[in-house]
Amino acid sequence: MSRGLRFSPRTPRTPRTPRTTLASALLFALGACNASPPASPLAAPAAAPPLAPLLAVAACPEVLGRVLTFATASDGIDDAFALVEHCAARPVDGDVVLTGDAWVWVAVDRDLGAVRVRQFVHASLHAQLRLGVRATYLQDHLEVALAPRPGAVVSIEPVGALEVSPLNWASLLAVELAPAAGTSVEWVAKRRLREETEQAIAAAIAKPLIFAYDARRGETWVVGTPRGARTGTAPAVVPRLRVVPRGTALLGPYPETEGPPRLQLRLARGARVAARAVCRSHAERLLEADRRGGVVGVEDWTIVSGDAPPAVPLTLPATPCPWMLALRAVDDAGVIASVDVVTAHGDATAAERGHRWIALDAVSFDGELPVDLQIVVSTDVFRRFVMPPAKQSLPALFELSGGEALWVRAVRPGTDATPPVIVARARLPLDEPQAVDALVDLDGPAGRLGRVHVEARVREAP
Amino acid sequence: MRSARPYLLVVLALSGVLLAFLPSGCAATPRRPQAAPEGAALARAALDTLEREGCARLLARTFPLQEPNTELSTGRLWVRRCAAVRSATALDLDVDVLGWQWSGGESWGFEVREYVYFSAAIHARLSAAIEATTDDVTLRVWTEKPPEVHVRAIGRVDAKASTPAATLLGAASSLVGRGPNTLATAALRARVRDLIADRAAAGIPIVLGEAPAVPGALPKALPLLDEKESLHPGGALISGSFAPGVTSTLHWSVEGEGTALARPVCVDEALELVDAVVAERKPPPARAPRGVVTMKGKGMEILPALGCRWVLVTGPRDDREVSVGLVLTDHAERTPRVAARRWVRATLVAYDLSDAAPAAGGGDHGESIAVTFAIGPDEASQSFGRALPAAKSPAVGLVAPLVELAWGAPLALRVLQQKPRPPSLFNATPGYEQTLLASGAARLAGGQRRQQHTISLTRDGRVLGWAKIELEQLEVE
């Protein structure tokens, strides 16, 4: 099925706590303050409409650093994600001029000319637009109308890996011949995606939008959407996410829980997905790795299978931080997952504990290793060989979030037909900010394989 | 997901609202705003927000009490109860606060040299308006009627007459059962009540902040605490509260030869002590203090993260008054005494290599070339990311893996042009041939956790373009 990218912004999923709603926008605006009495009590300020300056103050904190979810089609399945990295707003003649950069990733399952793309496509978005603004108070809530002015600037930069499959013999030939023309199919596909996406986003942001904000309940919604889509309360509709390879579907953040995070996942029978509760810094690293086109392993994730409908209750390992639910595809076909998270009370923006930067200076193995095994140290986004030593690439720096660990594993490599098998693993003690010089036993089912000597420097992340 | 601190900012805002009714030393602003229709809508939303969030924020922190006409903090207010109810056009606010302040003056004719403790019950009806000038946006909060203020001194103020008249007054009063301590206590009560009433009537404008002047500018980091304290024997100042799990750095500058102490304490532990004072009962037995920082001269100390919401308690070490400037930041400024190396995380923000791209077929993005970037020490830069099929981009946002640099060594950035290699009989996987297109370097500033650089990219002395990078660094020994 071929369908174009259409961005229809829905009420952001992440703002399930009051702070992440437009209510918080006003609070954020209030927050960016300091008590500053005017020098002269009688010096009345020049009369100016307050809305544009207020929105210029409030708009960016509302979206900055948050993961927003969207449905690009009318089926209501969230398949597009955005993380706003930079944002600036200023009032101009009663309007607001917004300039921003965002990381976006979209689950794409479509044909691009003669090739097929089925994966998360990652891109950077740069946009500048001017909005006419108007506010009214209706019954119990404030409504803010945004009317985009002509002349919006939109720029897209595709990043990450793009795997394309030829759909016919002609496209297979094109794949083969593209290098001779000084290009590659990946680049051609990216350029085409860029063109389409720029046009789609420019069209989407040219449409007027009215936000409603019920400050007493801390709810925000787009006027015209059902009340169930309001934020700040339990959503009436359980979100459905499209999860495809080469990317992470993210929901949250949710407040830190005393026990393990709990949720329910609903998948089609036979479908599988990998799930993990991650701290925000961990979610960032997953996203950064995908944007680099790197490999993300799911050895430490919980694999959920849709063999037990109607829903799979799931308890994930706890994190010492507000957490995000991360879902990754296990199979090439991807899945659609309905997710119902049991949220705790608390502050979803609280600081994260235990985030570390680590210099792994040396790792060595002392023992008799069967010839068919390799030894690696790895997290989901960091991986280095220990054995064979010729493949070592140390020292190396990497990050760990609170509750995350570096594991040393003895692995039997897979073939085209069989996946790799982990025959032994041990956790390396890199939890405290200090110099580490430790010996760790690596025990397998048949006894001790040997000992691993690790030297590292651990520091709290800045 | 860079961590801003909206929570802190929110607290500051709502602190401002409360401080409008407390003796904070702010100037009076008697102007009453006239709300325009749009302004009225925003004002109603502001009151709604204050009703929902105000008390929760107020209850989470202490407020400084300053000496009149100075910026020297000598006391604290702690909101112990708060209720807010919205009416049609106003917000009814009921607040109970506990306060304590060093009184070392000769006010009211009596010399009082001790911490005086009081509680105050305040009922006020707040109006609000949001206003804009050419420079800023302001939330103005005021009361139409003076608030009802009931002040209760906790214990008695221990006063000594400092003038003959006061001596006479004290002696005479004691004859009728109103000794100098009673008079001083009553005077304190009146002083607090008058200050609250004055501030409430005057109202207060709160500047709501301003948009970053430069698009993409790095956010300005606000300290958790930045004040000058006057610490006296027999009492302590409590600052906060602060979120759990935050590793922070305390900077101090102690005047003269004095020595002060600081200690992070879980808020529940501090509340036990404070509530015991309010109830005029014996404080709970002190636990063995841990994490006490001794402050002398100028210095800094990293405060390890606590697993609880916490406050910073400060006081003099001995029986002498100490003045100390304190700045508490919410990150560990682990600048070693002799930094030998840096750990750096770089983000490629934007680049333009239009001068390196063939003119034909450039398009909007200059699509005639494809490039990757490599970053790191000069001799060992690492490439990151897939080929970018454009000669320029205003927003890339690619984060490189962490690299280690020797102190003083430049951070090298190389641009590698990618050309696809046709698959062969021996290798069916398409590969790329890469050649160095241009390079540049950045010299990192010390002591700055985050910094931004625009690097000129050259080849054979010819400038081919530029790249903008953001850096986050950790200085290590």
Image: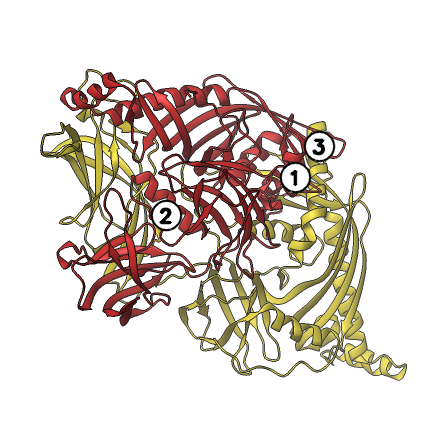
Chain colours: A red, B yellow
Identify the image quadrant of residue A86: top left
In the shown orientation, is residue B430 left or right of residue B141? left
Give the letter of the chain under mark 3. B
Asked if both marks, 1 and 3, belong to the same chain, the answer given is no
For mark 3, what is the residue?
Answer: B41
Quadrant housing the N terminus of chain A: top left
The picture places residue A166, in percent across and down from the top left corner, at: 27, 23
Q: Which labelled disc corresponds to residue A219?
A: 1
The picture places residue B358, in percent across and down from the top left corner, at: 17, 20
Q: Residue at x 36, y 21 (%)?
A: A111
- Of residues B438 and A291, which is closer to you in this image? A291
Q: Nearer the viewer, mark 2 or mark 3?
A: 2
Identify the image quadrant of residue A112: top left
| Mark positioned earlier in the residue sequence (1 or 2) | 1
Q: What's under tag 1, amino acid-wise?
A: Glu
Q: What's under tag 2, amino acid-wise?
A: Arg
In the rendered view, tell whether residue A105 sits above or below residue A456. above
How far is mark 2 from mark 3, CA to CA?
42 Å
Q: Secondary structure at mark 2?
A: helix
Asked if both marks, 1 and 2, belong to the same chain, the answer given is yes
For mark 2, what is the residue?
Answer: A285
